[in-house]
Image (cartoon, rainbow, N blue to C red):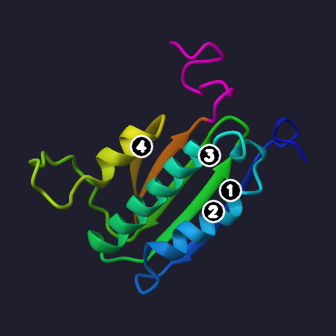
Amino acid sequence: MADSEMRAVGWAQSFPMSQGVRAGRHWAREHLDSLAWTKSAPDLVDSVLLAVSELITNAHKHAHSDAQLVLTWDSTCLHVSVHDSSPVLPAAVDRGPDATGGRGLAIVEALSDSWEQHRQRDGKTVTACFVPPGHPDPDHGPGGTA
């Protein structure tokens, strides 16, 4: 089925702290391969996989929680959502050039078209949106501008 015929598709998987981010990247890659645009946008796939790594790492490292990863393709945007059990929202931290960590959300922000975070009754969810080339930006319409 071509992307233009598909209204929405999604996948969900929980990644325990013991599995780490490698399993999450591998799982996400397998599902991304089913989307037609992945062959024409390999750099975007790499960006999505890096965001998956960063978001799962944040859930494990900062929330000390398993990570529930949900990928949703709605024919406009690939939503990459990671839920963890901590209600504490991530905050931007100014890291110096010598810092060895703490740049995960900055990386997600730089790679994605948009991202957001929401507290929920049982923790929080961080979601990044990735718009493949040739698809209209959901925030700006077909021309890509507001």
Q: Residue 25: give x, y in percent of width and height.
A: 53, 66
Which one is earlier in the sequence, the residue at label 3 or at label 1?
1
Q: Amino acid at mark 2?
A: Arg
Residue at the spot 43% in from the left edge and 78% down from the top edge: 20
Q: Is residue 135 magenta?
A: yes
Q: Amino acid at mark 1?
A: Leu
Q: Residue 128: give x, y in percent of width and height.
A: 48, 46
Q: Say which of marks 3 and 1 sits in front.
A: 3
> Which residue corresponds to mark 2?
29
> Which residue corresponds to mark 3?
42
Determine contact: label 2, label 1, CB under 8 Å: yes
Q: Classify 10 Å Cα crowding around label 1: few (below 14), some (14-19), many (20 and above).
A: many
Residue farthest toward the bottom in the current orientation of the protein: 18
Q: Which residues are magenta?
A: 132-146
Determine contact: label 1, label 4, CB under 8 Å: no
Q: Amino acid at mark 4?
A: Glu
> Which residue corresponds to mark 4?
116
Separation of residues labelled 4 and 3 (CA atoms): 24 Å
Q: Is residue 144 left or right of residue 32?
A: left
Work out whether residue 69 or residue 84 is closer to the camera in this orientation and state it. Answer: 69
Determine contact: label 2, label 4, CB under 8 Å: no
Separation of residues labelled 2 and 1 (CA atoms): 5 Å
Separation of residues labelled 3 and 2 (CA atoms): 11 Å
Residue 29 against residue 47 in the figure, above or below: below
Determine contact: label 3, label 2, CB under 8 Å: no
Separation of residues labelled 1 and 4 (CA atoms): 21 Å
Q: How many marks?
A: 4
